Amino acid sequence: MAYRAEPDGQYLYVLEGAVTSYSSQDPAQGSSPPVPPCILPLNKDTTQVSLEIDDRADKPSIIKISADHVRIEIAGAITAPETNEEILEFMRALLAVRLSQMSLIRGESTRHKLLMIQKVKPADVYQKLQKALKQ
């Protein structure tokens, strides 16, 4: 899980994925992990997903789900006019929703966007994203 390069070294190196905010053995958590904070319920009908986008991939895919964001790859350039359409179409197919249920809001930079999804619960979104991540 973690190590020091020197026995009395100043730095502790923690391996990626070694630290988590939940325990899979905690009965209160059930058999599945909680939904990360990057997938939030905004109200009873809307779920917000914080996205981080990498561009120029072979095909669109989910790279990583962390507490801060869902990291995806898209085939086009991040600055291309059709980028939002590519993201929406990829997420529509992945989440099995209609395009009319989704919208994208610009985030803190070009590579960060907020995806709003109507009538889908955060736990359902997370479950579908995890399934896509494993593929």
Image (cartoon, rainbow, N blue to C red):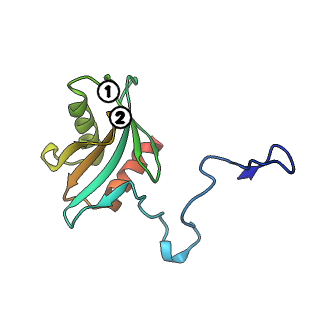
> Where does residue 51 sit, x and y in percent of width and height?
35, 43
Name the quarter where the C terminus is drawn.
top left
Amino acid at dot 2: Arg
Type of amino acid at the residue the image marks with label 1: Ile
Mark on residue 111?
A: 2
Q: Residue at x 20, y 32 (%)?
A: 85
In the picture as drawn, the residue positioned furthest to the right comes out as: 7
Query: What secondary structure is marked by label 2?
Result: loop
Label 2, label 1: how far apart the Cα atoms are? 7 Å
Q: Is residue 49 left or right of residue 65?
A: left
> Which residue does the image show at 86% across and 51% down from the upper left?
8
Give the total of numbered labels: 2
Q: Where, by quadrant of the figure, is residue 124 drawn?
A: bottom left
Do residues under tags 2 and 1 come within 8 Å of each other at their CB atoms?
yes
Disc 1 target residue: 78
Image location of residue 35, percent across then percent down: 41, 61
Given residues 81 and 93, the one toward you in this image is 81
Neighbour tally class for label 2: few under 14, some 14-19, many 20 plus, Cα within 10 Å = some
In the image, residue 93 lies at what x, y percent? 26, 41
Q: Residues within 10 Å of mark 1 (few under 14, many from 20)?
A: some
